[in-house]
Image (tube, rainbow, N blue to C red):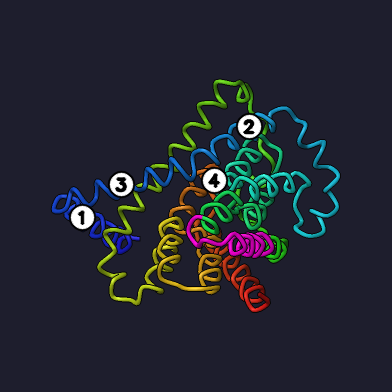
Amino acid sequence: MKKYNIFLAIFIFYIIINMVLFPEVYMAQTLNGISAWAFNVLPSVLPFIFFTKVLSSTGVVEKISKIFAKPCKKMFNTPAISSYVFLTSAISGYPVGAKMTSDLYLSGKINKNDAFKMTSFCSTSGPMFIIGAVGIGMLGNALYGYIIFLSHILGALINGICYKNITFKNSPSQQPLKQQQNKNDLSTIVIDSALSIISVGVIIAIFFVVITSMSPIFNLFPPQFASIFEGVIEITKGCIDISSSINGVWSIVACTFVISFGGISTILQSLTMLNKLNMPVWFFVLQKFTHALIATAISCLLVLLI
């Protein structure tokens, strides 16, 4: 841990020195990060965070989700309500699935082991980003976006099956928490939604700066590999560079891996939402890595068919 802290401190000093020497570059990159958040994440994620939290507070979701009890138990060994979280995550994108999973745990509707298993298939990107922003906007082909989205979602479902029997026996608070009181009033929901989406924006902007600081390292590699490395850190920047460095259908495979892994930026966004769960960081990263591998394999098969 001490060696890790020393390394982190050196890296932060390196970033700060670069910011002092090249302030105009880092101001521009920070603004680019804020713009990526404002135009790609904010309009699609904020309404879902707000309305899903309102809907969850009504108690209606649990009743509707009961029809999925048997499939969820058989496939993922999770409560029926996990189907609602998965569908909402698949529609809205990162980090809504993590936020909903955390809210369900804090409201006493699922236990910690349920939450740990749910994150394996309920942490997904959405069609607005994959099909709209990446497929049409970056790759210039809607079909590419649909292939990435299908691979990504099928990969999440298979990933959930892989983790269905995972348990953390020594983890505290395995039982659902007691219902929290006076936490579902409108003002609390508004404040909670706003703080959640602002924290996402801060992380995105910071990681645009991190990528800029690491550019001398990325420049040592061919552009194709450098763009994937950037995507492993921040998916929006990575997909933009993949679209200009990798030609043809193989851009589908590269974008599928980057989007399904989520990037360190998105992983931190999700872990911020899941902080009350005390989920081991390594376990969530492992879930995202296996999701990326499975989704990438599916995309390779689909690419060979087109």
Q: In the rendered structure, which disc, 3 or 4, sits on the residue that comes first in sequence?
A: 3
Q: Which mark is residue 274?
A: 4
- Callout 2: helix, strand or loop? helix
Count of numbered tags: 4
Report helix, strand or loop for mark 3: helix
Q: Horizontal and vertical percent for residue 298? A: 65, 71
User: For residue 13, which numbered disc appears in the image?
Assistant: 1
Q: In this view, does 301 lie above or below 283?
A: below
Residue type for callout 3:
Thr
Instruction: Based on the picture, tell me whether residue 113 belongs to the magenta stretch.
Output: no
Residue wearing tag 2: 51
Mark sitting earlier along the chain (3/1): 1
Quarter of the image that includes the C terminus? bottom right
Q: In terms of sequence position, does the residue under pointer 2 or pointer 4 come before the other?
A: 2
> Do callouts 3 and 2 mark residues in contact (Cβ within 8 Å)?
no
CB contact under 8 Å: marks 1 and 4: no
Residue 33, how many percent across, how many down?
36, 47
* Label 2 Cα neighbours within 10 Å, binned few <14 / some 14-19 / many ≥20: some
Q: In which quarter of the image is residue 152?
A: bottom right
Q: In this view, does 100 lie above or below 293?
A: above
Look at 52% across and 65% down and name the residue there. 255
Seen in the image, is 244 located left or right of residue 105? left
Residue placed at 36% from the left, 73% from the top? 223
Q: What stretch is highlighted in magenta?
A: 137-156
Q: Which one is nearer the viewer's eye here, 33 or 193?
A: 33
Which residue sits at x=60%, y=37%?
A: 48
Q: How far apart are marks 2 and 4 (CA)?
A: 19 Å
User: In terms of image quadrants, where is residue 96?
Assistant: top right
